[in-house]
Amino acid sequence: MPENNIPRRIGVISDTHGYLEPAAARILAGVDLILHAGDIDSPAVLRQLEQIAPVVAVRGNMDQGAWTRNLKQTELITAGKTWIYMLHEYGRLDLDLHSTDIKVLIHGHTHRAALETHQGVIYLNPGSPTLPRGAHNPSVAVITLAADGGNPRAEIFRI
């Protein structure tokens, strides 16, 4: 973890469905924190990710069983001065992001990578590294935080 234990590079992954693609793990190598936006399907995936960096995950619609009891539907992560909100399905968002200090919204579910910015908020879906849909490539994402607390940057990495 960088100085002051504030992550500077955050890996973002979703919809792994029980398998951590080795190419995804290579892209995430060196990040300070990993956020998993649900549909993990197996605690083994979380254990593999924890070998790379600390992990925060939310429950997806496919995450079932006793191992998911500690997974929340949503997470609010603070990284320095940056607030990140994460949930699995964007359609279940139940707050007005623009009336908060949230700078990044992470979601999954569609298996399609997407990156847009609206009114200063980054909307990021990292896609799926294992089961992309349509003509989309397998993918993960990385968020880079500015050391001075400025605007974060996000990038999607195609596998």
Image (cartoon, rainbow, N blue to C red):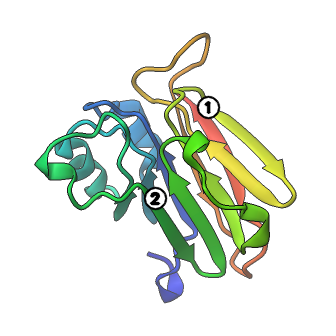
Q: Which mark is residue 80?
A: none
User: What x and y, as percent, mark residue 109?
Assistant: 49, 33
Residue occupying the point 62% across, 72% down:
83
C-alpha distance separating marks 2 and 1: 19 Å
Residue occupying the point 60% across, 18% down:
136
**Rendered position, 28 above or below 32:** above
Specify whether 21 is left or right of 69. right
**For mark 1, what is the residue?**
113
Q: Residue furthest top?
A: 135
**Rendered position, 86 above or below 89:** below
Q: Secondary structure at mark 1?
A: loop
Q: Residue furthest left?
A: 66
Mark 1 packing: few (<14 Cα in 10 Å), some, or many (20+)?
Answer: many
Q: Secondary structure at mark 2?
A: strand
Badges 2 and 1: C-beta atoms under 8 Å apart? Answer: no
- Count up the numbered dots: 2
Specify whether 131 is left or right of 154. left
**Rendered position, 27 above or below 129:** below
User: What x and y, as percent, mark residue 76?
Assistant: 51, 68
User: What x and y, as percent, mark residue 31?
Assistant: 47, 59
Q: Quadrant of the N terminus?
A: bottom left
Q: Which mark is residue 74?
A: 2
**Tag 1 or tag 2, which sits nearer the N-term?**
2
Q: What amino acid is labelled 2 in the image?
A: Thr
Give the foreground label among 2 and 1: 2
User: What x and y, as percent, mark residue 68?
Assistant: 22, 51
Q: Residue furthest right?
A: 119
Residue occupying the point 55% across, 46% down:
92
